[in-house]
Every structure is written in C-alpha cells, then in structure tokens.
Image (cartoon, helix red, strand yellow):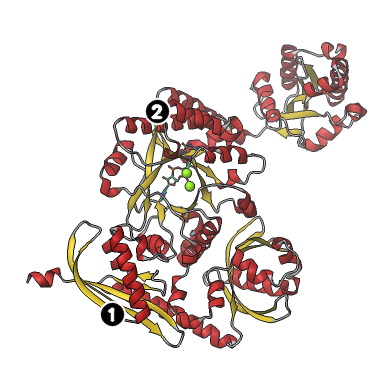
Amino acid sequence: MDTAASLPDYSAFCASAERLLRDGEDRPFALAAIDIDFFKLFNEIHGREAGDRIISDTAGLLQTFAATAGGVAGYFGSDDFALFLPWEDTDKDAFYTSLSSSALFEYRDGFFPSVGIYPVTDRTESADVMYERARIALNSIRGSFTEHVAVYDAEKHERLRKELRLLLDARRGLKNGEFLFHLQPKCDMNNGKIIGAEALVRWQSADSGMISPGAFIPVLERHNYITTLDCYVWDAVCRWQRSLLDEGFDPLPVSVNVSRKDFLEMDIAEHFLALTEKYNLPHELIELEITESAFVDSSLDLKGAIRRLREEGFHILMDDFGTGYSSLHSLRDLSFDILKTDIRFLDKGGQSRRGIDIMESVLNMARLLGVPMIVEGVETADQVEDLLSIGCSYAQGYYFHKPVPVDVYMQMVQNPYNVDRGGMTVQREEQIRLSEFLDANMYSDETLNSILGAVAFVEDDGEHLRLVRSNERFDRLIHTLLSTDDPAYSFVHDLSTYAEEMKRLLRIAEMNLVDGCSEMLVMKNSEGDTVRVHIRVFMLNERDGRKLFYMSAEKIEPKWSDEDLWRELQETQARLSFLRAALNRLPNPIFLKDAEARFLFFNDQYAKAFGMRRADYIGKTVLDLEYLPKDDRERFQKEDEELIRKESELSYESEFLFSDDTSHLALYWSTGVHDKKTDRRGLIGEIVDISRHKKT
Ligand code: C2E
Ligand code: MG
Ligand code: MG
C-alpha cells in the first residue's frame, strides 16, 4: 500500500494531467482508468494482505510505466488507478500487453487489470471529464472475463446519454400515471368473434405525446427497468379484470407480455399468484406471453416457473414463434398452452404462397405439439382466406381490430354477438387433409394413413443433416429403414446411404422456395424390401448458417410407376380442389359423410347456416351436434346409418333453425352412396330453403 499512497491522489493527478496537456503543446494524450478485475474476490480468496500487496505492486508498476512514457500515474483508493500519458496512434491491445506483461501478473492466478482509455480529443476539457469518460469505457467491460481493455466510444456514449434521458423520463412517467395499456382483440377467423385480447403497453408522455413500445421497451430491457414497468402493467390489467367482475361482467381472458429479464429479476410464478390473490382473480383470466427467444434461452431456467403457473391454471403463450428457432428441438421439452406466430416474420418479401406453406408447416408443428395456434399481424382478407384454408382458426391483427383503448374494447365485447367464449381448440392431426379422404380410390388404406401427415423437420448445418422433430407416422415410415432407436441419431447415421439423396432434395427445395421439392425415392426398409417414398420438402428458414426444412413423406404402392403416380396425384389434387370450390359456390348447404356417418365435408353455406366450424365437426357424427336436442340426435344418427347401409334416400320438409336465430322452412334431402369399385360407402345431403317459394 505504501507505494500506492505515495502516488498522486485524484486532485493532484488531475492537476498534473492538465499541466502535462498544457506543456505538451500539440502532443496527443490519453487518460486511462485502471482497476483490477474481481479485486474483491481476490481479497476473499487470498486474504487482505495479499490484496494490499497487489495494490502496492501495481502502483509501483504504473509509476515506472508512467515515468518511462513521460506521463503520470494516480491512485484513488481501493483498486482505482489512472494513467495520463502521451498517446500517438497507439494500439490499445499493444498498450495493454506492455502494461500487463510484467512478472507481477503471473502469480496472480488469473486476476488481471482492466483498462478504459479516453484519447483526449478536446484539450480544453477538464481532467474530471476525461477521467469520467475513461471510466465509461472501463465500465463497458466490467465483469467480462475475456475483455480487459476498451477505448471510449463517443457515439456509444451519446446513445447511452439518450437512453438515460429516456429512462429518467420513463421513471417520472410511471409515477405520473402516463403508462396505460390498450387491448387488441384475438379473433376466431371462422366467424370474426372475439375470444380474448392482448394487453399492450402505451406511453402517453406529457412531453412527447404517444410513444410506441418499440421506442422504449428495448431501452428499458437493456437497463433492467422493464420489470418495474411490467409489474405496473400486470397490476393494472388485473385490477381492471377485477373491476369487470365487480360490475357483474363475465370477462374474457387477457394476455400480458412477460420480458425475459423479468425471469431474472423475480419469481414470476410467485408474483402472479400473489397478484391474482390480491385481486381475487380466477387464474384463467390472465395469460402470459413469453417470447420464443426467452423460452429457448438456456441461461434462463423457465421450466420450473412455467410448470407451476400452468399447474395453477394460467395459460402460457409462446410469443413470436419462428423468430428464434435456434433450438427448435428443445421445444419438445418445453411446455406451453398456445403457440403464437407472426405472419409478418414468416411472409417476408410478399411471397405469399410460400408464406402460407410455412404457416401450414408451423401449424402442423403446433398440432404435433398438441397446442392451438394463433397468428398475429393478419392484415388482409387474402391472408384470412389462406389461413382458414390450411385450417388455422385464430388471429390477432389489424384486419380484425387494431389495439384499442379499454373503453372501446368494452363497447365491442359488451355485445354478446361479438364474443365467443369457447376459447381455442387444437385441430386434430387426422383432420389435416380432408381432400385425400374424398377421393378414396386413389390410395390403399395403408397409403392413406401415411398421407395423413408423416412429417418431420430437418436441419442442415452445412455438414450434417439432423432430424429436429418428427411425428409418429414419419417415424413409422422412415424408422423402419433404421436400426437404432433414437431417430435423431439414426437419421444421420443409418440414412447415410440416403444422405446424398436427401441433400439433393434439400438443395432443390432451397432453390424452389415457392413450390419446394417433390420427389419419389426408392429406399429399402428393415426387411430389405424396396419401398417407394414420396417426399415433399420446403425450406422454412435459415439462421446462423443452419437451414431448417419441413419434410413430408408418404409410402407409395408399388403397382404405380413414378410418373403415372405423380401425374395422377397432381390431377387428383386439382380435381379435389376444384370440386371443393364448386361445392362452396352452390347456394344450398351440402354435406358428405363417411360409412360411420362422420362428417367428411360440408360446404361454406352449411357452415354458415348452422354456425358450425369445420375444425369442430369434421370427423364427428350427428351425435356431436350440440344444437340439436339429444333425442333428435339419436334419431338422426340412426337414420344416417340406415341410409348408408341401404343406399336409400330420404327427404322431408321441416322448420330449420339457423345460427342467426331465424327459422326457415326447408327441404332436407340425403341419400346413401356406395362406390362398388372401392367398396366405400357414405352419405350426401342437401338442405334447400323453400320458405320463399311457399310464401308466394
Ligand atoms: P408483441 O407482443 O408481439 O405484440 C404484437 C405487436 O404487433 C403489437 O405492437 C401490435 O400492435 C402489433 N400488431 C398486431 N397486429 C398487427 C397487424 O396486423 N399489423 C401490424 N403492422 N402490427 C400489428 P406494439 O403494441 O407496438 O408492441 C410491440 C411489442 O412491444 C410487443 O410485441 C411486445 O413484445 C412489446 N410489448 C408491448 N407491451 C408490453 C408490455 O407490457 N411488456 C413488455 N415486456 N413488452 C411489451
Ligand atoms: Mg405479445
Ligand atoms: Mg408477437
């Protein structure tokens, strides 16, 4: 310590520095602030005495260094040192090496000095200001185990200054109640009804007017102030939900955003339990949106908190899915209730066809995970149509509603007609491809099974292919070709025979972003039999040199030649698509049922007339039609079965109650169908509104 005490203190050092600057004429100088990394820890490990010795040794070293360079060294207590010295185009790393290469540091067990340098640009500045800037540079590497030297960056400093200003304003604004939340409704696209909302923070600043979250949330996150704001918003949302209950209103669930920083700052589960207890609020009224990037951040352990919240009945949404896919495979270990993806992330560059294909893959993925999906950022009718066509039902976007003030939202949901309290449901995987059901003579049952979505996600990191995720059907189909149990392992190893082939397909998919790649591969299964597999591949995205692909596979019957089959497949799909479009154009409600009297298809008019969502009814029988009295359901079901069995026909006139509560006199007609070629049976029916004709 003695040597250190003999160095100039802060004011003596500043005076010397300013003198050197004055006397040095045009010579450039720099001021360096120096401390010792993790000095307190050093004291703890090696004891106080060893710590004192280091300070003293360092002081001696810096003094010699300053003298040689023609500068001055200072010591300001604890482990704070400074150097003021000539600085001509000096390389900071070379400077650091010459400063720290002394034998002194060798026995220090990894404890090094850290240096922040401010090269003097304005010679009229006081040494105070210079030291301050050197400290700013030093602070920018504080706590880093790898970086020991930094030079002051004026731009960065300016940015920091602005951010600080904003933080101070935000703190004041929070006190003055300038923060509020708006609500953006979430809708069921089948009927446009509101199923819930997301709370989005707004800053009505006294000085700058309305500031959008994009301008302040990242800053608040960087400076660990976001949690204060989030707690404020969550509290406000809960308080508001409570007030609705008190007024006798039955509120819809509202989701709040949770920042990844919040998980570092507090026990989120504990906090939400306390908050809902404070307001005596049922847990299902509050949902938590957590971004995918926080979910997959291995430095945060969200699992415990999320498990607890879900056990307590809170719903967890994975927000912005698709933006941080970096470890998609880890999704299977994560638990959440709803997947939320933003069409704007996926539909870049206006390649809408591709965007919708990607959406379909993501939707399939959600189905594999068994969770419902909601799409954010939906702005146009085309997008709605596309999304509905792939069986995606839920959306949040400007097309339906922009975020609105709470009172505007209340006006909307107070009208029960605007609201659907059914919540979100997952579409069963079996319902993905209705079209293939319709033309049954195309495939054997076995093929049909595999068509119903044998899908996988494959990642290519440039060297290896990796099976990120697959469903059971894919495993059954492809796995029979493998010998070890772990598909992720086997795919790479045992498919090495096909690796080149696979890579070729992926390359084609990469070049055809819109149509993807579609090819027939000939492979051998575990019994050594040759099987033909029809593979379709789409590239989903590319990040950090890793490309993610979506792959579907189906086994093809050997009796077909590749070309025949391919042509037939294309034609059938075109025919089916045309048939569906045609049925949807008919003015009357029409339906098709299979041999077990389950709905295979109904047209738009049918869906509209009876308010039936395809997602809820395809694959189900008349017994599941809740809008009919139970006795009627059983009677109708018997009737259906009879018609199918006997290929007979039925028609009668009756009053039908439509979903808009109007009653219509209609002619109901249906007939059993038997296709002898495929020995398939079913039922087709139509409802003809005859009230108009009867009146006249
Ligand atoms: P987010 O959670 O993904 O919210 C969706 C954002 O997309 C909102 O922007 C919403 O207004 C916007 N949006 C929704 N539909 C459409 C559309 O059809 N077209 C367009 N152009 N935009 C649409 P906003 O309100 O500016 O919020 C941005 C982000 O700020 C949010 O993204 C969320 O990450 C964050 N945020 C908002 N409120 C809070 C909060 O209270 N706490 C935290 N931590 N973050 C919040
Ligand atoms: Mg959100
Ligand atoms: Mg989002």
Place of residue 239 in the rendered image (x, y in percent of width and height, measured from the top left): 39, 29
Place of residue 165 in the rendered image (x, y in percent of width and height, measured from the top left): 51, 27
Of the pair 79 and 431, the residue shown nearer to us: 431
Residue located at (28% from left, 44% from top): 412
Inspect the image, locate mark 2, and give the three-letter code of the amino acid beneath it: Glu
Q: Would residue 453 appear left or right of 687 to someone viewing this image?
A: right
Residue 289's tag is none
* Disc 1: which residue: 649
Above-or-below relation of 46 to 160? above
Dot 2 lies on which element? loop
Q: Residues within 10 Å of mark 1 (few under 14, many from 20)?
A: some
What distance separates the C-alpha of mark 1 from that of mark 2? 69 Å
Looking at the rendering, which quadrant does residue 368 occupy? bottom right
* Disc 2: which residue: 178
Residue located at (61% from left, 35% from top): 156
Of the pair 626 and 578, the residue shown nearer to us: 626
Q: Would residue 33 appear left or right of 468 to someone viewing this image?
A: right
> Looking at the image, can residue 211 be seen?
yes
Q: Which quadrant does the N terminus fall into? A: top right
Q: Would residue 304 appear left or right of 668 to someone viewing this image?
A: right
